[in-house]
Image (tube, helix red, strand yellow):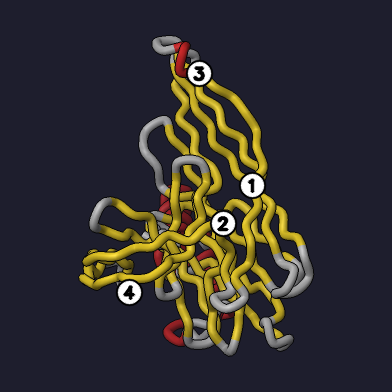
Amino acid sequence: MLYNEKNNGFQSYKEQLSLMCQKGLKGTGLKTTWIVLLFIGFYFTFNSAKAQSYKIESFEGTAANIKLYYKPLSGMLTISYLRDTFLINDYMSVDTVKVLNKVFLQINYVKRAGSNEDAINQLLLYVSNGKLCQALHVNSLTTYDRRPNEYSLFKLGVTLGGHNVETYKLTLNIHNEKSSKQSPKSNYKYNKIEILAFDKKSKIFYNSYEYIIGDYTFHNLIKGGGVSRVKGSLKNDVPVVKIEKDKYYYINGNWYTKDKSDFYSMLL
């Protein structure tokens, strides 16, 4: 339950609901009753928030409580631990949340997508030295469905192996298919397995490193839903997760996709 200072806590919502129902339903006609009920619906939509907490262990063995917070109609998911907060933009809903080996929190969430499309991203979180960190952040499902004319599906399943930083690994079960009546020669359907190693220093999963040199613009989400664009230089090996045609780069505690001279945060 969330505590709201303005309304003196979650209990006051119940009290106000009861009071409004009594006033709206006592000695009034049906029309007035429906107006009151509609008002109550709008009241809860705009003045309540949905929150859930998940308990994991930090890499140091201490208890950690990660909170997922979503205000209806905001399109933004807030994930917090102590003073650390991640904001996820274009958020629609949580698909699944699981705790892996007590130390990782796996969040699959639905992203806003285009017409005839669906998209789900997977975020793998952990806590170390009092900080909330991202071990992995990738796309785990995309579909384009205009059957019977055209259909495509990419689906990623993830299994954690190992029991500590010395042995952790991720097994990726990949399903990829495409069918088109207009271009049947381009059709394909297959399954494959990839393995991600664990970087003990950065505490992230990866399957390669890429040497990157040059000046780039980094696009990141900021509080309130705005986007910051900061220019910076890179000249080093960067951990990369390559899944089919997609690449995800781990830079300064965040995961990015890359487009020529720009890096785009996966939180956008």
Q: Distance between the residues labelled 1 and 4?
A: 35 Å
Q: Between residue 43 and residue 85, name the one nearer to us.
A: 85
Residue beneath disc 2? 207
SS state under label 2: loop
Residue beneath disc 1? 194
Residue beneath disc 4? 223
Dot 4 or dot 2: first in sequence order is 2
Name the amino acid type tagged 2: Asn
Dot 3 or dot 4: first in sequence order is 3
Quadrant of res 170:
bottom right
Kindly check if marks 4 and 2 are in contact, taking CB atoms under 8 A apart as contact.
no
Q: Residues within 10 Å of mark 1 (few under 14, many from 20)?
A: some
Q: How far apart are marks 1 and 3 (CA)?
A: 22 Å
Kindly check if marks 1 and 4 are in contact, taking CB atoms under 8 A apart as contact.
no
SS state under label 3: loop
Q: Residues within 10 Å of mark 3 (few under 14, many from 20)?
A: some
Q: Between residue 245 and residue 150, name the one nearer to us.
A: 245
Q: Is residue 51 above or below residue 210?
A: below
Name the amino acid type tagged 4: Lys
Residue beneath disc 3? 187
Dot 1 or dot 3: first in sequence order is 3
Q: Nearer the viewer, mark 1 or mark 3?
A: 1
Name the amino acid type tagged 3: Asn
Residue 234, how many percent across, how many down? 30, 70
Quarter occupied by the C terminus: bottom left
Q: How far apart are marks 4 and 2 (CA)?
A: 32 Å
SS state under label 4: loop
* Residue 234 makes an appearance in the image: yes
